Image: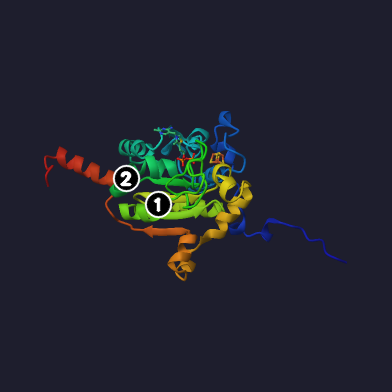
Amino acid sequence: MVEKVVMTETFIPKSHMKRMVDYDTYLRSNKMPTLWCSGCGDGLVMKALIRALDDLELDRDNVAIVSGIGCSGRMSSYLDFNTLHTPHGRTLPFATGLKLIKPEAHVIVIAGDGDALAIGGNHLLHTCRRNIDLTLIIINNFIYGLTGGQFSPTTPAGSIAQTSPDGAVEPTLDTVAVTKAAGATYVARTAVSNPRHISDMIKGGLAHKGMAVIEVVSNCHINFGRHNVSGKPEEMIAWIGRRTVSPDTAQYLNEAEKRERLVVGVLHQVDGRPEYVDSYYQKAAQIRNGGGNE
Ligand SMILES: Cc1ncc(C[n+]2csc(CCOP(=O)(O)OP(=O)(O)O)c2C)c(N)n1
Ligand code: SF4
């Protein structure tokens, strides 16, 4: 006689069980559904961010989300945290002010590639230079999504955009190289083809004391993909996924091959460098104690 197998919890070790996240509890129901195009990478990033915050079990009242203007900028309207929806390109000055008056808060900044690297490029350099304890998520979808597809600093040369109908001629800005050179002390790249990796990179950024920059390569299949790769989100995401490579594998690629690929992972981390808010308050205390020039 065949024995009946009863499935019990013991078949799945607890460590292998997928923890369920109640995503809805993190969203403002009165703002749903989102205005994003179906399949937009912004939704994947938002979900990965929620997962990261849920994993870390941070006190929600102690988390602030700052975003700018753009499709990605809408995230601060959808997430049920303390939020600031700021003018285009000005996320980092607002976030800096917030962090200065509330140093214990986890301040997370969401910006598009246009917001962070074009109009906000100046702020990006100086915020990285100060090594202020913020977590900046740059959603790089290679284009200005909200305004209909003008090329941005990350649009690959030769790509078709509304402002480059015959192919963009400008070389691109390397977010990782620029923010590392400017002084950010945690720099990571990840992509919408691997949402769990996005959560991991965000968690690393939140745990890091200092300026953390996480570039998430994402799909705007409507304004970029349609003209250059594919108008279908799943095809565009697969295209991104095929281009990703780990730092270990990247070391065997030549320079030309590396330029074609997206190296993902934590690409730069320095611990222990002075952090801006700490330095600021130390100086203020020093001045109060009569020793301002020491
Ligand atoms: C000062 C200012 N300049 C220009 C605009 C118009 N504008 C709004 S969003 C945007 C670009 C959006 O692209 P990106 O930042 O990459 O974000 P995405 O929409 O792709 O998420 C522009 C130029 C604006 N709102 N404010
Ligand atoms: S236009 Fe692009 S970035 Fe904006 S919601 Fe649609 S797919 Fe996303």
| Residue at far front of view | 166
| Residue at far right of view | 1
Q: Residue at x 38, y 59 (%)?
A: 268
Q: Residue at x 57, y 34 (%)?
A: 35
**Badge 2 residue CB within 8 Å of ligand 1:** no
- Name the amino acid type tagged 1: Leu
- Name the amino acid type tagged 2: Thr
> Residue 190, position in %: x, y?
49, 54
Q: Which mark is residue 173?
A: 1
- Compare marks 1 and 2 and give the one earlier in the sequence: 2
Quadrant field for ligand 2: top right
Q: Secondary structure at mark 1?
A: loop
Nearest the viewer among 56 and 125 is 125
User: Which residue is tagged 2?
Assistant: 127
Q: Residue at x 55, y 35 (%)?
A: 27
Q: Residue at x 37, y 58 (%)?
A: 269
Q: Secondary structure at mark 2?
A: helix
Give left or right: position of 94 versus 229: left
